[in-house]
Image: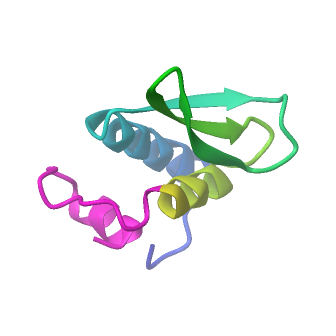
Amino acid sequence: MSRRMKKEEWESFLEELKGVLLKMQIAYRETSRIRSPGALCTVRGKKVLIVNRHMGPEDKADLVRREVKGADLDELFLKPEVREFLGG
């Protein structure tokens, strides 16, 4: 993002990113049972992004960006700021 955002803005932006994950058929799941930031994995044949619940919204958004990096986003309708954040 080109400007500093407040925590509330990051929380709202994270909700947008969760919507993108749904469009990509990736479930978003937060847990406190992991020590790492999280990762994209396959659970019972479905893609799931596991996220450490204790991270802030900006770090969670960065994790989403890192885990979907390189994915084909051309067929998805995304707001310009979301597309830019994800590197598409």
The answer to whether 42 appears left or right of 54 in the picture is left
The residue at the far top in this view is 44
> Would you place residue 71 above or below residue 34 in this image?
below
The residue at the far bottom in this view is 2
Give percent across and percent down for residue 31.
74, 28
Region of the chain picked out in magenta, as a range: 68-88
- Residue under the image location 45 percent in, 73 percent down: 1
The answer to whether 57 appears left or right of 13 in the picture is right
Q: Quadrant of the C terminus?
A: bottom left
Colour style of the rendered protein structure = rainbow
Whether 69 is among the magenta residues is yes
- Residue under the image location 32 percent in, 43 percent down: 20
- Residue under the image location 74 percent in, 35 percent down: 53
Give percent across and percent down for residue 35.
88, 44
Whether 18 is among the magenta residues is no
Give percent across and percent down for residue 62.
58, 61
Q: Is most of the magenta stretch helix, strand or loop?
A: loop
